[in-house]
Image (spheres, grey):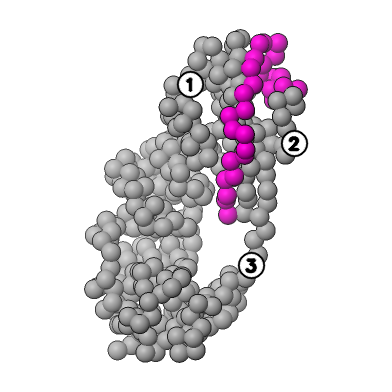
């Protein structure tokens, strides 16, 4: 039995039950694939269900505000996915009459849809024989053929894509693509795979050469940057606080946060002399209370954020600039915020 047929046979016997596997609706498949980018199934599944419940069709998603989409996405991370999701929903709903493209090459033109996602939609929904290549697929192929070419450079990507094309099952592309992804997730796992029960163990080159744990090879290219965030959490006597929306192209674009001072050396004395503080407080009476004695370390893929929260009680009305928003403290839960702030809000403003 050839490679692809063995994988499909294994998949049909071992696949997990997923709601997106019960349909070939391109909206559902597209939504699931975007959510599962850089996200494990266990984490992504509740988000998928929430989105389908809130927005049953692509037109429903298109009609939503960006704030609604970001709020529902809150905690899932990589928020550019949510913004691109919304942009594409509006494009499909309004420019394409609610109909997703049916060909791989046309799916690639959608915002936020790359080679992997386009291949998944095209094969699952339209039976087009285009292979998916994601982390699971890299792992399976590199081990099965004992390939030590790094997977995160251009030559490696080309090599594995070409291999995936050659192995593609043209008779059953939908099941084949799902099979190899599921096989990598459940059987050919990153750490301690049980090779003794693997249906491919008799022909796996890495197993024969005792090289399974060394594959796939990935070059270390990411340098982690340290940043120091100091959030000023204002609490006025009229039960109001201040937030603002991040608008730059860095992390958390479109999400809300408290007034921020980004500085590595700060304390209560330097806070009250900072322009951000002076603009909001003016001549008012205030009290500054550090909420934690040690910073909260929030780790992102390329950045580690060392974060402090300072509670500032003030007797006079808050003064805001055009970029800031004064809201009732009780309304804070309505706004999409990074999970770092959400964790704080859920405790402090419960």
The residue under label 3 is 220
Task: Give the structural element (helix, strand or loop) at label 3.
Answer: loop
What residue lies at 59% left-to-right and 24% top-to-bottom?
311
Label 3 or label 2, whichever comes before in sequence order? 3
C-alpha distance separating marks 2 and 1: 29 Å
Is 201 placed left or right of 316 in the picture? Answer: left
Label 3 or label 1, whichever comes before in sequence order? 3
**Neighbour tally class for label 3: few under 14, some 14-19, many 20 plus, Cα within 10 Å:** few
From this view, report whether residue 265 is shown above or below residue 91.
Answer: above
Q: Position of residue 251 (x, y in %)?
A: 59, 45
Task: Give the structural element (helix, strand or loop) at label 1.
Answer: helix
Q: Nearer the viewer, mark 3 or mark 2?
A: 2
Is residue 299 rendered magenta in the image? yes
Q: Quadrant of residue 232?
A: top right
Along the viewing direction, whichever of 306 and 221 lies nearer the viewer:
306
C-alpha distance separating marks 3 and 1: 44 Å
What residue lies at 58% left-to-right and 41% top-to-bottom?
296
Q: Which quadrant would the N terminus be assigned to in this image?
A: bottom left
Along the viewing direction, whichever of 15 and 196 lies nearer the viewer:
196
Looking at the rendering, the stretch of residues picked out in magenta corresponds to 272-301
The residue under label 2 is 265
The residue under label 1 is 329
CB of mark 3 within 8 Å of CB of mark 1? no
Q: Position of residue 71 (x, y in %)?
A: 43, 37
């Amino acid at each position: 039995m050839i490679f692809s047929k063995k994988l499909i046979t294994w998949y049909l016997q071992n696949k997990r039950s997923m709601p997106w596997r019960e349909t070939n609706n391109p909206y559902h498949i597209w939504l699931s694939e975007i959510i599962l980018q850089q996200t494990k199934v266990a984490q992504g599944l509740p988000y998928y269900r929430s989105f389908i419940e809130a927005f049953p069709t692509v037109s429903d998603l298109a009609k939503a505000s960006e704030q609604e989409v970001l709020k529902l996405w809150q905690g899932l991370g990589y928020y550019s996915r949510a913004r691109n999701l919304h942009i594409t929903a509006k494009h499909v709903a309004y420019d394409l009459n609610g109909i997703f493209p049916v060909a791989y090459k046309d799916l690639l033109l959608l915002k936020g849809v790359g080679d992997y996602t386009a291949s998944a939609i095209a094969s699952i929904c339209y039976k087009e024989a285009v292979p998916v290549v994601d982390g699971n697929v890299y792992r399976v192929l590199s081990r099965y053929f004992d390939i030590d070419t790094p997977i995160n450079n251009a030559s490696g990507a080309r090599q594995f894509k070409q291999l995936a094309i050659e192995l593609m099952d043209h008779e059953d592309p939908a099941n084949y693509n799902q099979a190899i992804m599921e096989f990598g997730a459940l059987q050919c796992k990153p750490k301690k795979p049980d090779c003794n029960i693997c249906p491919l163990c008799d022909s796996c080159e890495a197993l024969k050469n005792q090289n399974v744990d060394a594959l796939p090879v990935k070059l270390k290219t990411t340098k982690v940057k340290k940043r120091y965030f100091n959030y000023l959490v204002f609490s006025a006597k009229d039960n109001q606080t201040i937030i603002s929306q991040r608008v730059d192209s860095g992390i958390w674009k479109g999400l809300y946060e408290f007034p921020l001072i980004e500085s590595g050396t700060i304390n209560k004395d330097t806070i009250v002399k900072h322009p951000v503080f002076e603009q909001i407080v003016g001549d008012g009476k205030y009290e500054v209370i550090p909420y934690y004695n040690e910073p909260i370390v929030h780790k992102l893929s390329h950045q580690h954020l060392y974060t402090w929260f300072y509670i500032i009680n003030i007797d006079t009305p808050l003064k805001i600039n055009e970029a800031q928003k004064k809201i009732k403290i009780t309304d804070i839960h309505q706004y999409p915020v990074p999970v770092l702030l959400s964790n704080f809000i859920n405790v402090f403003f419960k």
